[in-house]
Image: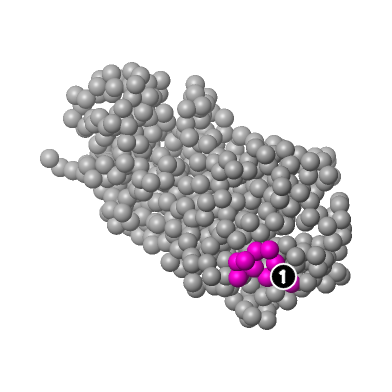
Amino acid sequence: MKAPRITVYIACHNHEAYIEEAIESVLRQAHGDWELLIYDDNSADGSSGLINLYSGDPRIRCFTTSGVGLPSIANMAIEAARGEYIVRLDGDDYLDENMLLVLANYLDRHPDMALVFPDYYLVDEFGNISSREWREKLFHSNHVLDMPPHGACTMIRRTVLQEVGGYREDLGAQDGFDLWVKVKSQYRAGNVNIPLFYYRRHEGNLTGNVHRIANARRRIKNDAVADRLDAFRPITAVIPCRQNYDFVRDLWKQDVNGRSLLQRALDHCTSASLFDRIVVACDNPQAEEVVAAYKDKRVEFVLREAADTIRSHSIVPTLDRIVKPTENLNGITVLHYVQAPFLSVATLEEAIATLILEDADTSFGVEEIRELAYKRTSHGLQAINRVGGLGSDFSTIYREVPSLVALNNKNLRFGSMFGPRLVSFVATPEESYFINSQEKLDIATVLAKRFDGTGRPSARPVMRREIP
């Protein structure tokens, strides 16, 4: 039998309400040269009965698995596939009838491309469209490849999937991001600005699990750059603090659940094994007493000039004093502000990994602004972002999380922490918490009793290095 051109596989776990629509969307495809692999992954509802209705179609092969999860099913599908191109479809989503036709034609015409993905619609549990997700064209208007395509509507060459080793099965989430990191470092990718996929958002899918997604994302990034870290050393953590100009004098001394803000920042940094130096920079010599209590040889104190601590003054002169004498502006510096009491080791490492992975000058945490934001114009207010509706990834507005910044030390030659290539990572809500008022300090004390010792935010370091 002649092998089909395209393999589509569906992973289904308790998608009784949606699986028929997913399967039918494949049957309706304008491109007819395909096969469909359906995996019922230990569903406890009526999914299996609906899947069996299609088992007589010679183009469809049905499998039953024992709750192994999506990444394992993806690897099974790669092994079982006979098509040159492979597409994943989740059991609660569905395809536009032209998706296989358009994407296969793109790969046929671009043999140098490893994969291609379309725009897509977000729909609710009833199929009502809430917005169109539109990605700017890669390598044309979008040159920072830090956002992966949606894994469930991407067409990828089977040979590429085999060459990169398929999907990781140890992450629990973000396996598509891991694949993207591996593919983009070796191959080219493309996208088409036509919505050809319907992505369903409902209570049962993983999209809203912020911490599980964040932890998986961090592991992927850290693993991707682990072999490259030495080329970016020395890696220095700087904890800046000051005597005046905050809402309370010597803010770094303030207690949050039994530890001062400076101690909490030092605890974070000393738990991160990848730092070569950990520098506390303060204009109050009393901070040196806190530093002296840490036996970690990487920890040191630098006395800041009081003139460098005023609110309108750049911190770059302080960084110059710390970095230049010993490092000749090589390496990376991470600023950890004491006002961020719930920062985790994993996020400190993610800041560094993001900087290296995206070949950037500066990386920092952000939060997406999900409410409409406006600017004043000559005719009144005008929205500068979108909530639902039509807009590209360039329409998203972010707020900087002032907890930490990672920078290439060479930026300091130009008197700035920020070079021209800025990248970001999404911070969790806890780690976005920043103390800039007495009220927020009081709330932090309450929050700390909930977070401390619970593993959230996670303080587990991912990248390992021997600590002197």
Residue 354 versus residue 2 in the image, above or below: below
Residue 171 versus residue 38 in the image, above or below: below
Residue 9 versus residue 298 in the image, above or below: above
Q: Which residue is mark 1?
A: 301
Q: Left of 121 or right of it: where is 340?
A: right
Q: Position of residue 39 (x, y in %)?
A: 29, 32
Q: Position of residue 296 (x, y in %)?
A: 60, 66
Tell me which colouring the rendered structure shows: one colour
State the quadrant of the N terminus. Answer: top left
In the structure shown, which secondary structural element does the residue marked by tag 1 occupy?
A: strand
Q: Residue at 49% across / 23% down in the picture?
A: 125
Q: Left of 281 or right of it: where is 429?
A: left
> Visible in this render: residue 397?
no
Q: Position of residue 424 (x, y in %)?
A: 60, 54
* Quarter where residue 71 is shown: top left
Q: Left of 231 or right of it: where is 155?
A: left
Q: Is residue 295 magenta?
A: yes
Badge 1 density bin: few <14, some 14–19, many ≥20, Cα 10 Å: many
Q: How many marks?
A: 1
Q: Residue at 38% across / 62% down in the picture?
A: 186
> Visible in this render: residue 282?
yes
Q: Which residues are magenta?
A: 292-302
- 403 vs 379, nearest the viewer: 403
Residue 390 versus residue 225 in the image, above or below: above
- 110 vs 316, nearest the viewer: 316
Q: Position of residue 278 (x, y in %)?
A: 64, 67
Q: Residue at 42% across / 42% down in the picture?
A: 172
Q: Amino acid at mark 1?
A: Phe
* Quarter where residue 21 is shown: top left
- 16 vs 59, nearest the viewer: 16
Q: Residue at 63% across / 72% down in the picture?
A: 409
